[in-house]
Image (cartoon, rainbow, N blue to C red):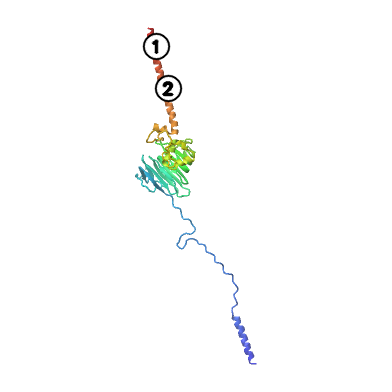
Amino acid sequence: MKRLPLLRALGILALLLAACQPSPAAPGPAPAADIPTPQTGGDAAGEPQGTAPAEAARSATLETLEGEVNWRAGEADTWQPAQLGQALAVGEQLSTGADGRAAVRFSEGTLTRVSPNSAMTLTGMSADASEPTTEFKLDSGGLFVILNGGSAEVETNAGVASVRGSYLNVRVTPQGRTIAACLEGQCSLATNAGEVALTNGQRSRASSADEAPEDPQDMDAYEYNLWFEEDDDALRLALDLGLVDEEDFGEDCDFESGQGCELDDGCDDEGGCDFDDEDDQGDDNGDDGDSGDDSGGDDSGDDDSGSDDGGGSGSGDDEEEEEEDDNSGSGGG
């Protein structure tokens, strides 16, 4: 009987101990899978991630120099001898002497050749090499623009010549007339009074900014020879485009190297002719366009001289008639 209270006490103690135990926690959500945290920029070294490197800005360098070639930073600066490999910046100028030639290479591959007796300024150069635009100011002489994509403009005192494609030659004559010759590509010549479009093997001329350019004409032999002399690829390009034929050249022409390849342009001067100089009568005869204008003047001159000759021969006939009259008179006497 004494054991019952003890057992009852032990039971109560067990119940109390059970009540004090914490209840099992409810099952929580499954742990989330590892998700990569997006990077907002910068790696361990601090470099940006996922962006293409910025393209370098375009540049221009004097690739070749021949004879007298001078450079200056601007209009107010003194001319200095140009240096091979020298950089050419926007606003800077080049000039060449009678024996001078220069080639300016742009970083994307565009090439500009400066002819003898020329003065030009690099007036604009876009930074985008994927669609480059380049601008020049030509005061005298000539420029050959050979594009590697993009477009170019050449401003003169008479107008603006432009090209999108490849090959454009712009010349300013001693008389101030602008000539644009498009060997290949889409070219144009514009003045304040109008604009003409040019394509393969065509040229146009503008006398002043206030006169419309002439209608397109075929390039003449003199202009093709200028290209062949300035650029090694021009001959093959002209042949491939069907602008000239191999039969047009003499037997001395080496079509692989271009040596000895020259069209007959009517020049009789061993030192060469400048058909753009209208004051040189011999040179005018070689330029189809100029010779057309000048020969018209010569023809009228020939007509005048012919009429003079006719007058002279008429006078001679009158003198003969007078002599016959005299003779007949003396014979009658």
- Other residues around mark 2 within 10 Å, as few (<14) / some (14–19) / many (≥20): few
Residue 158 in picture, x, y percent from top left: 43, 38
**How far is disc 2 from disc 1 in space, using C-alphas?**
26 Å
Quadrant in which residue 171 is drawn: top left
Q: Nearer the viewer, residue 239 or 217?
A: 239
On screen, residue 5 above or below 255: below
**For the view shown, which residue lies furthest in the right direction?**
1
Tag shown at residue 253: none
Q: How many marks?
A: 2
Tell me the quadrant of the picture where the N terminus can be found.
bottom right
Residue 280 in picture, x, y percent from top left: 39, 33
Badge 1 is on which residue? 325
Residue 57 in picture, x, y percent from top left: 44, 51
For residue 195, side relative to residue 12 (left or right)? left
On screen, residue 275 above or below 103: above
Which one is in front in this view, the residue at disc 2 or the one at disc 1?
Answer: 1
**For the view shown, which residue lies furthest in the bottom direction?**
1
Badge 2 is on which residue? 307
Circle 2 sits in a helix, a strand or a loop, which is it? helix
Q: Amino acid at mark 2?
A: Ser
Q: Is residue 157 visible?
A: no
Q: Residue at x 63, y 91 (%)?
A: 3
Which is more N-terminal, label 1 or label 2? 2
Q: Amino acid at mark 1?
A: Asp
On screen, residue 129 above or below 191: below
